[in-house]
Amino acid sequence: MRRLLGTLFCMALVLGQGVANAAWTYMGHIDGHTVLIDLTTVELKGRNALVWMLTNYSSVTANQLLSATTHLEFDCDKNKVRYLQFYGYEGQMQSGARLISKTQSSVFVPVEIGTVMKSFQQIACTRGPFFRQEGVLNKPPK
């Protein structure tokens, strides 16, 4: 029994690390804030795609945040996005204390052309865990 509890505790620690060990790739700036994507988290879920985004704020926000991670879900066929989870941190790059945790999904909203969010959608919906072949962007997996 003790060994089982120890194993479960170790598994919880590994799984609980979540996006803390992410491999962030620079995507651009939104209103002076740096936006990054974790390409290792791109996940296909039916005809939708999920990915993690990190925002490093250029100055402290009203909520005392300097960075935030957001789990996004894109509806690849309908050109929409929604937020699944949001975590706000007191330091850059998810450092310091976690000050905000929101795990309630938002509603889908349209993705506007020419935005960084559109770039996220293109990467998530066309890349998946591996590059897809030309012409299979919106075909369901077999």
Image: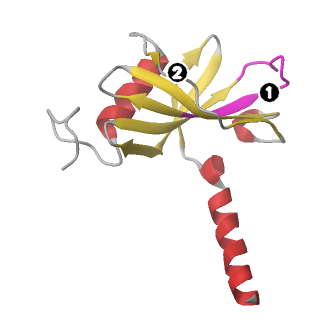
Disc 2 packing (10 Å; few <14; some 14–19; many ≥20): some
Q: In front: 131, or 102?
A: 102
Q: Disc 1 marks which residue?
A: 65
Quadrant (top left, top right, bottom left, bottom right) of the N terminus? bottom right
Is 22 positioned to the left or the right of 125 in the image? Answer: right
Disc with the residue nearer the chain's start (2 vs 1): 2
Marker disc for residue 31: none
Residue sitting at x 47%, y 33%:
73
Residue sitting at x 56%, y 29%:
83
Is 9 positioned to the left or the right of 15 in the image? Answer: right
Residue 100 in magenta stretch = no
Q: Amino acid at mark 2?
A: Gly
Span colored in magenta: 57-71
Residue sitting at x 17%, y 36%:
136
Chosen colour scheme: secondary structure
Q: Disc 2 marks which residue?
A: 28
Query: In the rendering, at what x and y percent does residue 126 appear?
Result: 29, 34
Q: Can you tell which of label 2 and label 1 is closer to the viewer?
A: 1
